[in-house]
Amino acid sequence: MKVALVTHSFLPNSIGGREKYIYDLARMLIEKGNEVKIFTCSDSILKKSFYTRNSLVIDYLPTLRFPLLEGIYRIPLMFFLRLLKKDFDLIHAHDFHHFTTFISSIATKIINKPLVVTEHGYPEQVGLMKSAMSFFDTLFLPKIKNSSRKIIAVSNFIKNELVSKYNIPKKKIEVIYNSIILKEYKEKSEIFREIYGLKDKRVILSVGRVIKEKGFQYLIKALPIILKKVKNVKIVIIGPPSQFKNALISLAKKIGVEDKIVFCGVVSDEMLKSALYCSDIVVIPSLYEPFGIVALEAMAYSKPTVASKIGGLMEIITHNQNGLLVQPGNSFQLANAIIKVLEDKNLAKKLGRRARECVKRYDWKRNVCEILRVYEEAISC
C-alpha cells in the first residue's frame, strides 16, 4: 500500500507527541512492506527540502508562518499540487484544525482517494487563537468531516470530544491508542545523570512542551511541600521551551526553589531514554491531555508515574495499580502523591512492575495492524 502521511509540523523543526506518533507509525508501516511518504511544512517560505532515512521520505514544502502566543501556525505553499501529482492509495492527515488537513480533504476528492484523519486533541483556546479556530471550524471543518472516510481518535476521551464538539457520527470514529516501539526502550544508560550533575539526587522527571496546559506550574508549587519530607530532590523538565518558561522561572524564584529545577529544553532521543531510566518518578501534571505518550515511555522503563486525573491519562493509568492519579491543578495532592512514592520503595516497585506489564498493549508492533485495518476499510468504502 502507498500511504501519504500529512502533518502540519514534523521533526526536527517541531517536537511533540504528534510528530513522534507519525515518525513511529511511518517506520512501522514500512516494516510491514508499505510505501510511505510524509508531507509537511518547512520552516521558511523560501525553503523546500527532502530528507530520506531508512526508506522514509519526508517532503518539507515552503510555508507561510504565523507566530502565535504559544507556537507557530503554518500554511504551506505547493502542498495541494504535490498531493495531486502523487499516486497514493490513501492520504492519512493529522489533526482537524490544520490547513494541511483541509488541503488533503480537497485533494482526495479530486484524485478520488480515501482520506483518513487522526485527531490528536487540541486544548481550549482563548483570545485571537479562539477566534481563528472558530473561523476555521465554520469555513473548513465541514469539508474535512465530509471528506474523511475514517477518523482515528487516540483515546476515548478524544472520541467523546469529536462527537460532542464537532457532531461526528460515532460509527465513523475508531479509537486506536497512541503507541511506542517497545523494543527500543531497553537501553540502560546513566549518561543523563552524569551530564546534568544529578548523581546523588532524587529525580522527579516531567516531559512535554513548556506551555501552560502541561501544568508544570503546579509541579513547581508542589516542590516546597515535597522538600519538607524528601531531601536531595531535583525537578527535571524536558521539552521545547516557549514564552511560558519565563513565567515558570519567575514562579520558582518567588517561592525559593529555582536551584532545585533543571530546564533541559529539547534533548536527543537517546538522552530522553536515559533520563527516563535515571528518574526516580515521572510526573505528568497536565491540565489537558488527549493521551500522554510520556506515560507509556515511563511505563516502558518500569517507572512509577503520578499523573493528572484527566483526559486520556485516565485510560492508561489505573489509580494505585500502575500509577497514581491526582486532581489537575492541585499542587497539594500532587506533592503528597510524589512523597508517597519517593518514601515507599515497595510501592514504587509495585507500580513500576505493573506499569511495565500494562505497556505491552500499547506496542506499535500490535497497533500498526489496527491502523492498516482502518486503511483497508477506508479504501473499500
Image (cartoon, rainbow, N blue to C red):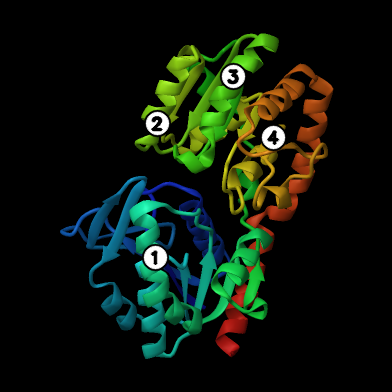
Question: Which circle marks residue 305 in the picture?
Answer: 4
Disc 3 to disc 1: CB gap under 8 Å: no
Query: Could you tell which of marks 2 and 3 lies nearer the N-terminus?
Result: 3
Residue 166 occupies quadrant: bottom right
* Residue 57 shows in this picture: no
Answer above or below: position of 253 versus 51: above
Q: Nearer the viewer, residue 146 or 133?
A: 133
Q: Which residue is mark 1?
A: 98
The amino acid on which the numbered mark 3 sits, given as a three-letter code, is Leu
The amino acid on which the numbered mark 4 sits, given as a three-letter code, is Thr
- Measured as percent of width and height from the top left, residue 270 is found at 50, 35
Query: Could you tell which of marks 2 and 4 lies nearer the N-terminus?
Result: 2
Which circle, 4 or 3, is nearer the viewer?
3
Q: Nearer the viewer, residue 62 or 274?
A: 62
Mark 3 crowd level (few <14, some 14–19, many ≥20, 10 Å Cα): many
The amino acid on which the numbered mark 2 sits, given as a three-letter code, is Lys
C-alpha separation, residue under disc 2 versus residue under disc 1: 25 Å
The amino acid on which the numbered mark 1 sits, given as a three-letter code, is His
In the visual, does 238 lie left or right of 231?
Answer: left
Q: Which residue is mark 3?
A: 223
Query: Could you tell which of marks 2 and 1 lies nearer the N-terminus?
Result: 1
Q: Which residue is mark 2?
A: 245
